[in-house]
Image (cartoon, grey):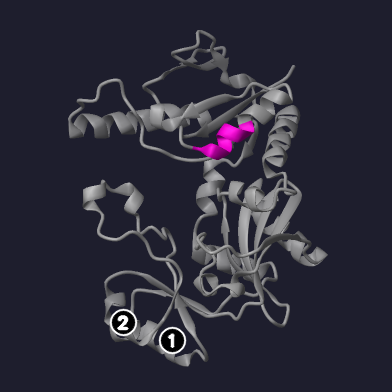
Amino acid sequence: MRHSILIVTNSGDLHADLVVPILAAKGHRPFRIDLDAFPRDYQCVQTFDAAQVRQRIRRLDDERWLDLDQVGAVWLRKAAEFAYRSEELAPQERAFARLETEQALFSLLYNLDCYWISHPRVLRGAQWKGEQLKRAMRLGFRVPASIVTNSADEARQFLQALDGRKIFKTMSSPTLAAETLAPDERIAGGLGTVLVEDAMLAQLDAVDEMFCHFQEYVPKQYELRVTVIGERVFAARIDSQLDARTMVDSRDMSAEIPYTATRLPQDVEQRCIDFVHSYGLEYGALDLIVTPEDDYVFLENNPVGQFLFIEQLIPEFKLLDAMADQLIAGAACRR
């Protein structure tokens, strides 16, 4: 029996939009939960009796129910705020509805005994940047000298002891959490990785207010975006040093810097796979630096990181097909 593939995301997820037709072309019809339309556009049933547990879900525009016990693979992509049939819920009603919806949804999903990319339990364990650095060191990666602290004195001593340039980077959100607020509540658009200049040093007492993350600036020959899907590795070389806008932070997509396919040394490639799998993840998007001396330096792993832009820049990387194939293989093996 062919097991179903479940995709949990939101309606604005272009990655899922493009993978679904690939799955269909390969003979699979995945069921998609768009969380920004859930539970408004869905019905779920979970029943318990002495003999069995039954759990089903359907979209209101489709009379067919999906038996969740027949799901062989889940692709967990993007979160979103839930939606309800009534748009006039009072704040407390909406807060209570969100809690009850979480209880119902995760009671359905958490117990699915199948292949996951990736389970929310392991995703949560894989998102902490400081823990990632420690794990990367344990697996043999070089990492930048770093400090995470809410002590201005400790930050000052760390920065003074470092030779060369230093950087500041956020740990959680380069958008400074702007996406969680209404437009009229936002006071800043975002903050990428920046060099620590005299003006920042003069305001270092602000570190006492909130945790901050400083690192040594690692000289770059080029950067790497390494996408791991199952056992497959796709390494994209990013020549960030060819444009002043991307020398410190390569995420400025207004700069047309080259992205090219490359092969990692076998030991580095295996280290990337081992890092991702050490969490129980089946997917990861790692950011690395290659120094002028050809050292490989670990920066971070994005356990649900974007990959479509990599395929757009390097068409020979069939990442959408690779993700579809991984889901199909996982569903066939159902574990």
- Residue furthest to the top in view is 63
Q: Residue at x 70, y 71 (%)?
A: 140
Task: Answer whether labels 2 and 1 touch (C-beta < 8 Å).
Answer: yes
Residue 238 sits in quarter: bottom right
Q: Is residue 110 left or right of residue 113?
A: left
Q: Is residue 76 visible?
A: no
- The kind of residue on which mark 1 rests is Leu
- How much space separates mark 2 and mark 1, taking CA atoms? 11 Å
- The kind of residue on which mark 2 rests is Leu
Circle 1 sits on which residue?
A: 159
Q: Residue at x 37, y 61 (%)?
A: 190
Circle 2 sits on which residue?
A: 204
Which comes sooner in the sequence, label 2 or label 1?
A: 1
Q: Which residues are magenta?
A: 13-19
Picture coordinates of residue 18, whole percent (x, y):
60, 34
Residue 104 is one of the magenta-drawn residues: no
